[in-house]
Image: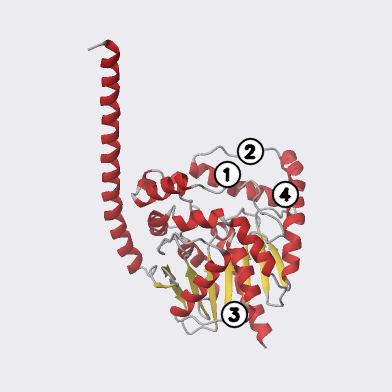
Amino acid sequence: MSKAKKIFKIIGFILLGLIIVCILFIIVSLINHKVKSAKEWTMLEEKGYVNLVDARDYKMNAPYWGNTEGKHTVVCMSGMGVDDCSLTMRKISKGIEDDCLIVCLDRAGYGLSDDTKDEQTCESIVENCRTALKNAGFEAPYILMPHSIAGIYSTYWESVYPDEIEGILFLDTTPVLNKEIFEDEKPKGAVTEFLYTFSCDVGLDRFFPKLYWTYLPDFYTEEEIEIHNALYAQSSQTHALISENNNINKNSLLAYEKFIKTDIPKTYIGSSYHFETVDDFKQFIEVFNEDMRRSGKPEDHKTDEEYEQMLPGFNNFWEQNYVPYIESLGNCEIVTIPTGHMTYEYKPDEVGEVLVQLVEKVEAAKK
C-alpha cells in the first residue's frame, strides 16, 4: 500500500471516529434532554405554569394568576424569543392581582406552547391569541401588555378589533412605521432553520445556554432561575420563532396598513433610547454592562464626556422613529424608565406602578 493511500485511510478512520463520537454525543444529549424535560414539565405544572389551550391548529400555553373574578383581564405578550414571560411578568403585576386576572400568552414555539411550521404572520398570531383566550374562558375586553416586537401585534389587534381592547401598556415596544424596521435583517434559510431547531430538539442548547438563553438580574431567587431555565430549555429555537423573525418587517408593514387611531387609554414605557440626562444614559449602560458580564462579553466603559456626546444620537433616534408612532396611537402617555430593553425585568416595581396607573385610567374611562 502506498504512503498516500495509508494517509487517506488514516484520515478516513479519524473522520469515521469523529462521526461516531458526534452521533453518540447527540444520542446522549437527546436522552438527557428528554429526561430533564419530563422533570421540568412536572415541576412547572405543579407551580402553575402550564395551561394548554387550543389556538386553532396547535396548543398554546396560557398560564394565569391573580383574581379570576377580577374587573379586568391583563394579557402579557413577550418580546422576540423570550420564553420566560410567564415568570418575569409576575414581578410587575403584584399591585393589580387583587382586582385583575393576568394571563400570559406564549406564542407558537415559545415556552411550553407547541411549535408549528405555519408561517407566523401578524394576522395569524393575533387570531391564535384571540382563539386561545376564548378557549381558556377569558373573554374580552383585555388590557394588553406587550414587550418589544409584540407591540406590532398589539397595534394590529387594537386596530382590527378595537372593541376587544380597553387599555395597552407598551413595554419598550417596536414602533410601527411605514418602512422596514430592520433594514439589515436577513431571513434565516432552510439550512439555518434546520440546525437551530435540531439543536433545540435534541437538547444541545442545554450545553450552550449563553448562545440562546437570556439572563435574569441578581435579585431573582434560585427557584425563579430554575423556572427560567426550564422554560427556555423547552423551546429556545423553534420553527415558529424563526418564521416570526423572518416576518418582522412584513408584519410591521401590515400593522401600519391596518392602523387606526383610538381613544383607548395607553402608556408607552421607553427605556432603550429616550434619556433626558447623562445620568439616565449611565443607568442604561449599567444594566447593559450587567448583561454583558453574565454573557461573558466585553463591557462598555466610557467617561461622562463620551456618554454626553453619545446622548444626542440616541435621543434623535427616539424622536425620529418612536415619537411619531406613539403620538399617532392616540391617548398615549410616555413614561421613561432608563434601564435598557428588558426594563420590566430590571425595574419591576417601577413598571408595576405604571401598570397600576394604567388600570386606574381604564377604570376612569369606563365611568
Q: Position of residue 353 (x, y in %)?
A: 61, 69
Going by the image, does 229 lie left or right of 274? left
Of labels 3 and 2, the one closer to you: 3
Q: Position of residue 168 (x, y in %)?
A: 63, 72
Q: Earlier in the sequence, mark 4 or mark 1?
A: 1
Question: Separation of disc 2 and disc 1 at Cα?
Answer: 8 Å
Disc on res. 314: 4
Disc on res. 301: 2
Res. 222 in view? no
Q: Quadrant of residue 362?
A: bottom right
Looking at the image, which residue is at 59% across and 58% down?
343
In this figure, which residue is indicated by the disc labeled 1?
289
Q: Nearer the viewer, residue 150 or 303?
A: 150
User: Relative to 156, is 361 above or below?
Assistant: below
Q: Under tag 1, what secondary structure?
A: helix
Amino acid type, label 3: Glu
Going by the image, does 205 lie left or right of 170? left
Amino acid type, label 2: His
